[in-house]
Image (spheres, rainbow, N blue to C red):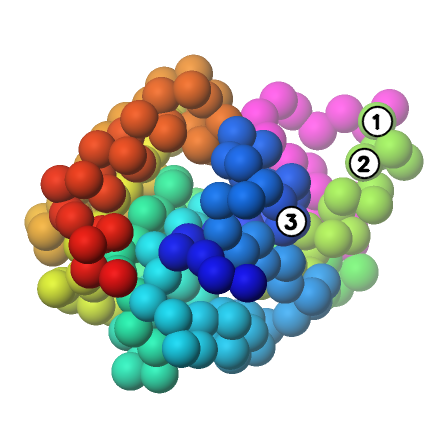
């Protein structure tokens, strides 16, 4: 298969389902194995891009293996499109970032101790909005079980300055200070930043996303670089 784009999902939807506004012929849609580590995901991504120089699209925590692979020296990429990238390590010390990491750390500790309900009481409002609802607990338990073991997006070796020299577009939804803080840090490293409001953590689902990507590809001459 010939492709000029690779699409990397976040912690929710997988494969092409994570990019419903993108045509199925737009590139390669990766789907990482459930439970795979970040290091394993980097290996999968490197193997998928072997012999290519693609434009990497990554959503949320998918930005972690994308940046690590793109800067590993094992592959070459034409550019990065990072959608609400969860690159928490580049903004450690920022209040909103530290509050989030502290809350998730406390929640995961409860899950480790066997208190899955206590874990969900902390994580659900933090990640999905709205208070914990005891009446919905049995219905939401499978989601709690999955989120209790999913990768956290910090502690994987992502550092400031890693994307320097790689044309990068950052797209955020303008709804969460954590992602806007990360975007500002990437802007300081030379990335472009665009905000598409209306879909919160999934701005790639909105019609304006395609036009922003097209303009980025034209100004950075991604296609000509292939």
Residue that carries the numbered disc 2 in the rendered image: 140
The residue that appears at 25% across and 51% down in the rendered structure is: 223
Q: Nearer the viewer, residue 183 or 29?
A: 29
**Dot 3: within a 10 Å radius of its alpha carbon, few (fewer than 14), some, or many (20 or more) residues?**
some
The dominant secondary structure in magenta is: helix
43 relative to 126, above or below: below
Position in image of residue 114 (x %, y %): 80, 60
Position in image of residue 132 (x %, y %): 70, 29
The residue that appears at 62% across and 22% down in the rendered structure is: 130
User: Is 119 on the left-hand or right-hand side of 9?
Assistant: right
Q: Tag 3, which secondary structure?
A: loop
Q: Quadrant of residue 176?
A: top left
Q: Tag 2, which secondary structure?
A: helix
C-beta proximity under 8 Å, tags 2 and 1: yes
User: Is 171 on the left-hand or right-hand side of 124?
Assistant: left
Q: Is residue 167 magenta?
A: no
Q: CA distance from mark 1 to mark 3?
A: 25 Å
Sequence-earlier tag: 2 or 3 = 3
The residue that appears at 42% across and 28% down in the rendered structure is: 203
Q: Which residues are magenta?
A: 115-135
Position in image of residue 172 (x %, y %): 33, 33
Q: Quadrant of residue 179?
A: top left
Label 2 or label 3, whichever lies nearer to me, is 3
The quadrant the N terminus occupies is bottom right
**Dot 2: within a 10 Å radius of its alpha carbon, few (fewer than 14), some, or many (20 or more) residues?**
some
Q: CA distance from mark 2 to mark 3?
A: 19 Å
Q: CA distance from mark 2 to mark 1?
A: 6 Å
Residue that carries the numbered disc 1 in the rendered image: 136
The quadrant the C terminus occupies is bottom left
Q: Is residue 120 magenta?
A: yes
Q: Which labelled disc corresponds to residue 14? A: 3
């Amino acid at each position: 298969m010939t492709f000029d784009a690779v699409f990397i999902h976040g912690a929710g939807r997988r494969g092409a389902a994570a990019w419903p506004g993108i045509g199925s012929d737009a590139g390669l849609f990766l789907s990482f194995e459930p439970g795979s580590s970040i290091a394993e995901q980097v290996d999968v991504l490197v193997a998928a891009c072997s012999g290519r120089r693609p434009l990497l699209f990554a959503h949320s925590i998918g930005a972690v293996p994308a940046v690590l692979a793109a800067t590993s020296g094992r592959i070459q990429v034409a550019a990065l499109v990072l959608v609400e990238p969860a690159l928490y390590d580049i903004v450690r010390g920022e209040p909103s970032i530290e509050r989030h990491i502290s809350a998730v750390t406390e929640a995961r500790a409860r899950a480790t101790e066997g208190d899955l309900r206590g874990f969900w009481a902390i994580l659900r409002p933090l990640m999905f909005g709205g208070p914990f609802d005891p009446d919905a607990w049995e219905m939401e338990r499978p989601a709690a079980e999955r989120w209790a073991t999913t990768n956290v997006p910090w502690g994987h070796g992502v550092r400031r300055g890693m994307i320097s020299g790689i044309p990068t577009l950052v797209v955020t939804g303008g709804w969460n200070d954590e992602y806007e803080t990360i975007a500002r840090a990437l802007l300081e490293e030379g990335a472009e930043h665009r905000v598409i409001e209306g879909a919160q953590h999934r701005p790639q689902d909105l019609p304006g996303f395609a036009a922003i990507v097209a303009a980025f590809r034209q100004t950075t001459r991604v296609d000509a670089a292939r």
